[in-house]
Image (spheres, rainbow, N blue to C red):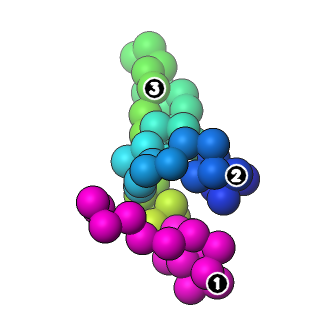
Amino acid sequence: SMARKIYLRQGIGVGGFQKIYGGRKRNGSRPPHFCKSSGSIARHILQQLEKMNIIELDPKG
């Protein structure tokens, strides 16, 4: 799904994937709020896709 999202939105990075795959954080008795997902998982998947030559690193970053 990440390769498809990169195809649709070129230039997306780890922070963008954190927003896409984030969700509701339950805070116990306090109200729930949106929370970003883990960055290490998104970063690891992007590194794997780059190693398989499915995506390439953007020179801008």
Residue at the image point whose x is 49% and y is 31% from the top: 25
Q: Would you say the residues marked 1 and 3 are in contact, meaning their CB atoms lie under 8 Å apart?
A: no
Q: State the residue position of label 3.
A: 34
Q: Amino acid at mark 1?
A: Met
Q: Which mark is residue 4?
A: 2
User: Tag 3 or tag 2, which sits nearer the N-term?
Assistant: 2
Residue 32 x, y percent position in the rendering: 47, 20
Mark toward the viewer: 1 or 3? 1
Tag count: 3
Q: Residue at x 38, y 48 (%)?
A: 15
Q: Earlier in the sequence, mark 2 or mark 1?
A: 2
Residue found at x 31% / y 67%: 59
- Residue lying furthest top: 31
At mark 3, the secondary structure is: strand
Whole-number angstrom distance, CA of label 2 to CA of label 3:
24 Å
Furthest-bottom residue in view? Answer: 51
What segment is highlighted magenta in the picture?
Answer: 45-61
Inspect the image, locate mark 2, and give the three-letter code of the amino acid beneath it: Arg
- Residue 59 within the magenta-colored segment of the rendering: yes
Q: Is residue 27 above or below residue 45?
A: above
Quadrant containing the C terminus is bottom left
Q: Nearer the viewer, mark 2 or mark 3?
A: 2
How far across and how far down the image is residue 18, in percent?
46, 46
- Viewer-proximal residue, 46 or 35? 46
How far across and how far down the image is residue 16, in percent? 43, 43
In the picture shown, does residue 8 fall above or below 58?
A: above
15 or 33: which is nearer to us? Answer: 15
Amino acid type, label 3: Phe
For this rendering, which residue is in front, 47 or 28? 47
Q: Is residue 2 above or below residue 55?
A: above
Residue drawn where x is 55% and y is 42% of the image:
9
Label 1, on which residue? 52
